[in-house]
Amino acid sequence: MQLVIISGKGGTGKTTVAASFSYLSINSIKADCDVDASNLHIILEGKDRESKPFTGAKLAYIDPAKCVQCGDCENTCRFGAIRNYKVNELRCEGCAACTVVCEFDAISLENEITGRTIITEIDKGILSRAEMEIGAEGSGKLVTEVRKNAIQYRQNNELIILDGSPGVGCAVMASITECDAALIVVEPSQSGLEDFARVLSVVEFLGVKPYVCINKYNINEEISHEIQKFCSDRDVDVIGRIPFDNTVIKAINELKPIVSYPDSVAGKEIKAIWEKLKYKMKEEAQK
Ligand code: SF4
Ligand code: SF4
């Protein structure tokens, strides 16, 4: 089974929940799909075991020895990526149109390294993660690779827990696809509700079973009720309500999972959500 933890936008407490589940779950494989800002390995005190370059895109290259400076490629490139017979790497989309029009065989497409995939050893197993190069495109492909690496470490069909990236972009779609369940973390604010509605529709579109937890539900009980009503109208299970807790800020500053603080009220609720979710996922799988 695969469980992804996601949110409609950043800063909702998604990683607090994902790090806690990873800490509580001994046998699962963990995957940090937040390739733009991976940080699960820091909270889980991991040690990197291997790291490989990832070539997720192609870039055009002009060989000056073959180029006769006719300008055909510059006129063809829709992305304005060629100026003065040179390719601007930040603009090139690797579409290959320039290679087709160049009659002098002066342009080739080359693999571009867009990030690194990393296997990290943590106290409770293996964490698959990646780091994207600054300004690189194609985070969806990198997320797919992170998942593939996590699957490779499975021995007995263990659960895979994925920390998805926030929002509804292609990296998020890549982390939700193939999952059996998605836990959406939402904060009670008007914009939080709108972002949540968007990400919920993506989860439902991809045919993944959604569960919801409201983080800091007591900072705005009115909107928390609105979120619950919204979910119950769509038959979506609100599996937990995490209270505001100052210990969460302490845990973030100390780079530790909140569930490792025994007196934390938020930690206690996250533990309860984890138990409920495991039970519900098992129940769902038997249907
Ligand atoms: S089409 Fe080929 S020969 Fe002409 S400018 Fe471009 S690279 Fe040079
Ligand atoms: S590969 Fe496409 S985007 Fe890149 S320079 Fe050539 S035509 Fe432009």
Image (cartoon, grey):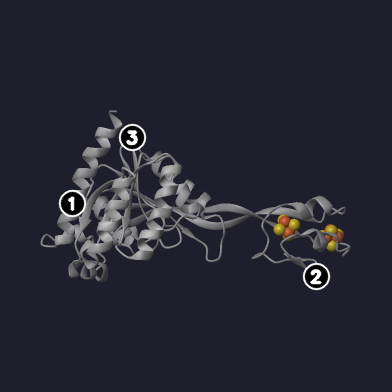
In this rendering, which labeled residue sits more in front, label 2 or label 3? 2
Q: Are marks 1 and 3 in contact (CB under 8 Å)?
A: no
Residue 52 appears in the picture as rendered:
no
Q: Quadrant of residue 62?
A: bottom right
Residue that mark 3 sits on: 155
Q: Give the residue at mark 2.
A: 84
Disc 3 is placed on an element classified as loop
Q: Residue furthest top?
A: 287
Q: Is mark 2 within 8 Å of ligand 1?
A: no
The three-letter amino acid code for the residue at tag 2 is: Asn
Mark 1 or mark 3, whichever is nearer to me: 1
Q: Quadrant of the C terminus?
A: top left
Amino acid type at mark 3: Gln
Q: Residue at x 89, y 62 (%)?
A: 68
**Which numbered marker is on residue 271?**
1
Give the mark, 2 or 1, whose residue is nearer the N terminus: 2
Q: Residue at x 46, y 55 (%)?
A: 168
**What is the CA distance from the residue labelled 1 to the residue labelled 3?**
26 Å
Question: Viewer-nearest of labels 2 and 1?
Answer: 1
Which badge, 1 or 3, is on the more N-terminal residue?
3
Q: State the residue at coordinates (55%, 55%).
A: 138
